[in-house]
Image (cartoon, rainbow, N blue to C red):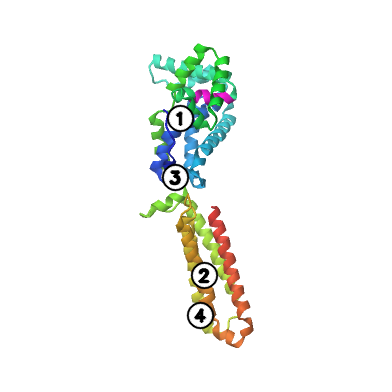
Amino acid sequence: MNATISESDITLAMRGDELAYRRLVEQSANTVCSIALAIVRNVEASEDVAQEVFLAAWTGMRKLRNPASFLPWLRQVTRNQSHLWLREHRREVFAGDELLAAAVDARPSPADELLRYEERRVLAEVLDELPEDAREVVILYYREQSSVKHVAELLAISEDAVKQRLSRARAKIREEMLRRFGVAAARTAPSAAFATVIAAALTNAAPPAAAAIAGSSGKAATPLLAKASLFGAALGIGGVLLGMKRLEPLFDEREAEELRGFRNTASFVMAIAAIVFAFTAREAPPRWSALAASIVFGAVIWYLYRVRLPKILARRHAVEPADQRETIGNAFGAVCAGAAFMLLFVGRC
């Protein structure tokens, strides 16, 4: 296969581009399936694990902050998922030839069925004999057109390390068996159909939250965005309401009416800010839109509490001038606390 992971596709996928992620699946399917096969030692199971890995990776792409971390992260997710599968299906892996025969689809011709069975028998036998640290290298070596350099890049190890592990494998496994293993490994590598299956499954998987940015055509926000927006708004509005409590007792009916309008405006600003931050804070890598939203939000809050609110309270402070700074300061402190909690919650969702 010898596919090269595209950094531009990683960046696009981090922003929620599904087509870019499909290309990443095609580019990394061999690596993921090979790592999984090295652990579970069953071809069908390795592809099942790989499907779970790619679906999980799609929903977790937003967590990445650096495209260079994609492949190391994907390798680790694959190993974790493979060990989880192994714990849940340990008996199936070690059931011997009966399991291998049962895994063969009965629909192919007897000759094809026999070939598939023999391939899996060879794979299982050699993988059982190989040192654990050599399995990934050996499988990828035969699936990546015998390229030591490419295997080293995919596993983030040196070319010398690849050569050493291949040498240990050759010393431990008979040459004829290793040759047959190489043929079987190449024949069982994931085909283009594998990427197609993943692409179809993506339509039912939750995309990264950043994908909602691309949904300006009217697509609904993801559940994660909705949750972040809802609770972020609740925290921000809570700060507004607490600030209003700090202004009691009210001076007169006119002030009460003006403060109700102020409260509604400030609450609306908090709700809108929570939604905006839920979208912009999810972008990977971060963009200027998040900074711009923060500046605008801060300016609006400053205006409301440092310009608009003093005007509403002017008549009260004409009678009680000594309390003006403390009264407004308490209200401003409450809303800032609510805003801070809102930003913290949305930023972590």
Left or right of 276, for residue 167: right
User: What crowding class fits label 1: few (fewer than 14 Cα within 10 Å), some (14-19), or many (20 or more)?
Assistant: many
Left or right of 124, for residue 190: left
Q: Which residue is mark 3?
A: 11
Q: CA distance from mark 3 to mark 1?
A: 21 Å
Q: Amino acid at mark 2?
A: Ile
344 lies above or below 262: above
* Residue at the spot 54% in from the left edge and 12% down from the top edge: 174
Q: Residue furthest left?
A: 217
- Pick whichever of labels 4 and 1 is earlier in the sequence: 1
Magenta highlight range = 133-140
Q: Amino acid at mark 3?
A: Thr
Q: Which residue is mark 2?
A: 301
Residue 30 — which label? 1
Q: CA distance from mark 4 to mark 1?
A: 67 Å
Q: CA distance from mark 2 to mark 3?
A: 34 Å
Residue 257 — which label? 4
